[in-house]
Image (tube, rainbow, N blue to C red):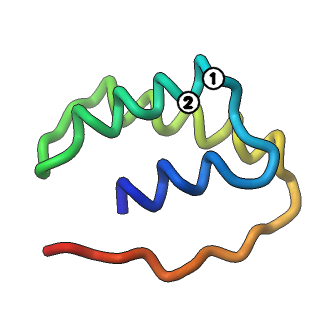
Amino acid sequence: MLLAFGEHVRSGTTLDETSLSRVDRALGRLRGGCFDRAAVDVLTEESVRWVLRNPDRVPLPTPEYRR
């Protein structure tokens, strides 16, 4: 799911490079099942930014799950 999120915010009208770097760092802190509240907050903030830039719905492909 984390990989899908990282790809999705790079679709449509993408986030700026600073935001994408923040997303990548946050995703790195959450990989492997770790919980990091600050990383979750970053993903929440950046997902809102992405939605504001992309108000029309975008169909999502089925993500690959590796569990």
* Whole-number angstrom distance, CA of label 1 to CA of label 2: 5 Å
Instruction: Name the residue tied to disc 1.
Output: 17
Relative side of 30 to 2, left or right? left
For the C terminus, give its image quadrant: bottom left
The vertical placement of 23 against 55, above or below, is above
- At horizontal 57% and vertical 79% (from top left) the residue drawn is 61
Q: Crowdedness of circle 2 by 10 Å Cα count: few (<14), some, many (20+)? A: some
Residue 55 percent across, percent down from the top left: 86, 53
* Viewer-proximal residue among 53 and 3: 3
Q: Residue at x 39, y 56 (%)?
A: 3
Vertical placement of residue 8 versus 63, above or below:
above
Q: Position of residue 16 (x, y in %)?
A: 70, 25
Could you tell me which residue is drawn at 49 percent across and 24 percent down?
21
Q: Callout 1, which amino acid?
A: Glu
Q: Amino acid at mark 2?
A: Leu
Label 1–label 2 contact, CB within 8 A: yes
Q: Which residue is mark 2?
A: 20
In the rendered view, does 40 fall on the left or right side of 65?
Answer: right
Count all numbered tags in the image, as a single digit.
2
